[in-house]
Image (spheres, rainbow, N blue to C red):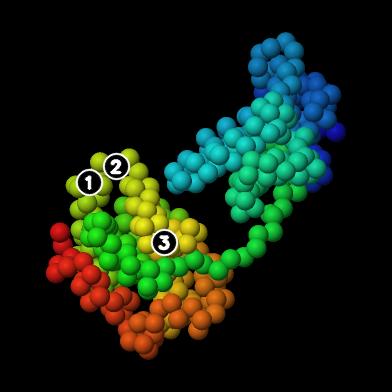
Amino acid sequence: MAKIRQRGDNWVSRVRWNKQEKYIALHTKSKVEAEMRNALVNKYELEIINGMDVVFPWISKDTNVQIKPFTVEEACSSWMKKRKEIRNNTRIINQKSLDYFISFFGKNKPIDNISNSIIIEFIDFLESKGLKPSSINIHLRTIKTMFRYWLKMEKVNKIPLIEQLKVKKKEPIYITDEEFQKIASLEWLDSFYKRIFLLYRDTGMRLREPVFSSLDGSWIDIPSQSKSGIERNIELEDYLKPIFIEYKDWLTEGYGSTLNDVGDHISKMFKKTLNSIGADDNKHFHSLRHTFAVRSLIKGLSIYNLKLLMGHSSVTTTEVYSNMNLKRVAQHFPKLVDKSQYSTKIGEWDMDLWDKANGITSYVA
């Protein structure tokens, strides 16, 4: 049963259930009037507990009580409006998840009526769309995060059971030295792109990180707007510094500045390159980042230092590389193993071969 409490000069009605509570403003300084209004609150206590938006006459100035369920559409749209600080890519993914959610449940379904069994049906719906378990898990995480927010805001009474699907773990897909040399030998591929691919492979930067990164001496400063939200710094070898400068000029003043999505352009160019050399279809741009990690571990870098270079928020993410059979993987990087003995600087061993394949005498265009 709801009871009145005084807050400052005004009175509120407190509804409590299952260690939860919600306060309803009574908009009066009179205790007598507060008791009268609290009696009306008690009549609609069940609706309040069930997450419905109950609007009382003293709030809306309407003579009747209005009951508005908190719908799926309202929950989704309101939640997205509050997520102002997230990256654009995350926003796009979140919106896609919510679109699926609304498509399945409908706009007007009270969100608090979504049960565990219906969530299972929602998962079946996502599978019917041809989504892989890893993609479904991304959407489920979005929906669960939204439910957690509305539970905190007391708009829902519970969170349905939303469990991640089991995904068979796969080893990171990397680019072998042989494949990279084939890329260097491609006559149709502009040497600019070859240098850019080398920069990514030998720094482990994410696709769009160079866009908002800056150079300070020999250090690339990557701000917190990156995926992990962690600032980090990468020290460049001498051969990489002019490539990074060239890339930044291309991004700000060259062809890159004319593109709507420069990251998409670079990614598609690399995929086209991989197709040209006959690489496995499951290899893609992110494989360059995996390659950096694998090469670093073969050279003897610790898993903790690799975590820092990669910008992972947890070493658990980085450990996927250490779980690989590095001795076997090393056969795909024979020059690195033979020449470096786990100590040579990243990329140093193959620079001569790379230069000869492209006739490059300088890394500044």
In the image, what residue type sits under mark 2? Leu
Q: Does residue 271 sit above or below 93 in this rendering?
A: below
Compared across the picture, whether 9 is left or right of 221 comes to right
Q: Secondary structure at mark 1?
A: helix
Residue named by callout 3: 278
Q: Position of residue 89 (x, y in %)?
A: 46, 46
Q: Position of residue 144 (x, y in %)?
A: 66, 47
Labels 2, 3: front one? 3
Compared across the picture, whether 88 is left or right of 156 comes to left
In the image, what residue type sits under mark 1? Tyr
- The quarter of the image holding the C terminus is bottom left
Residue named by callout 1: 255
Name, please, the residue furthest toward the top. Answer: 63
Q: Position of residue 347 (x, y in %)?
A: 31, 75
Q: Residue at x 34, y 48 (%)?
A: 265
Marker disc for residue 85:
none
Q: Residue at x 38, y 47 (%)?
A: 264
Q: Is residue 153 visible?
A: no
- The quarter of the image holding the N terminus is top right
Q: Check contact, mark 2 vs mark 1: CB within 8 A.
A: yes
Q: Nearer the viewer, residue 3 or 227?
A: 227
In the image, what residue type sits under mark 3? Gly
Labels 1, 3: front one? 3
Residue named by callout 2: 259
Q: Does residue 318 sit above or below 297 in this rendering?
A: above
**3D distance between C-alphas at marks 2 and 1:** 7 Å
Q: Residue at x 45, y 68 (%)?
A: 174
